[in-house]
Amino acid sequence: MAQGDHIYCSIYNNDKPPYHHGIDCGNETVIHYQKKYKDRNDGIILWVSMIEFAKNRKVYIEKYDTFDPPIVVFMRAKRRLGEETYNIFYNNCEHFARYCKIGKPISLQVENAKEIVGHNGIAVADGLSKNLINVIQSAESSKKYIHKSIENILNLGRDQDDDDNDNRFLNLL
């Protein structure tokens, strides 16, 4: 492996799809989209060690007939560090790696899914995933608001001896 290589590994460590993609930056480091939260459809482009990227999975090099020079690939990847516009259907780790390598954001995994479920199926799935994220974020926000409101109610006309009971009640939420 060398700087500028498009690399990938099996997400489930079974050498089968789906695959996770990144760009080899040399010195045993990789730039890739990394999930910020395990249960969410989000991510951030980070520069990490090869060990962190691979997580004990076998790493492969994606082969191309034509591709841009390694320094161009590396600079494209580096320019996008910190980006947080991950979308599993339109801007995922494979889109990122192929964009860096050939200048075109393509995901063969998504293209294969489109062949199976069609463009409308992808659009529906994208909409559902965005709605689910909004529901989760709203629930988290509501929980914080309710917690604060109960805390304010408990603070009305109370003295310091009530702290233990209040804390036990708040911990139940």
Image (cartoon, rainbow, N blue to C red):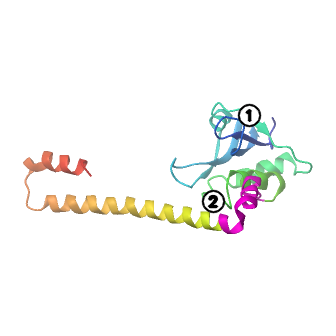
Mark 1 residue type: Asn
Could you tell whether 63 is left or right of 164 in the image?
A: right
Label 2 crowd bin: few (<14), some (14–19), many (20+), radius 10 Å:
some
Could you tell whether 110 is left or right of 150 in the image?
A: right
Task: Out of 30 and 169, give the one closest to the viewer.
Answer: 169
Q: Where on the picture, by quarter, is residue 47? A: top right
The quarter in which the N terminus is drawn is: top right
Q: Position of residue 146 (x, y in %)?
A: 27, 62
Residue 36 sits above or below residue 141 on the image: above
Q: Helix or strand or loop: what does disc 2 sit on?
A: loop
Tell me which numbered mark, 1 or 2, is placed earlier along the sequence.
1
Q: Position of residue 137 (x, y in %)?
A: 44, 61
Task: Out of 99 and 130, give the one closest to the viewer.
Answer: 130
Residue 167 sits above or below residue 145 on the image: above
Question: What is the spatial separation of the Cα atoms under label 1 and label 2, in whole angstroms?
Answer: 29 Å
Residue drawn at (16%, 50%), measured in percent from left and top? 166
* Residue furthest to the top: 56
Q: Which residue is mark 2?
A: 87
Q: Position of residue 70 (x, y in %)?
A: 84, 46
Q: Which residue is mark 1?
A: 27
Which numbered dot is residue 108? Answer: none
Label 1 crowd bin: few (<14), some (14–19), many (20+), radius 10 Å:
few
Stretch in magenta: 105-122
Mark 2 residue type: Asn
Residue 115 sits above or below residue 47 on the image: below
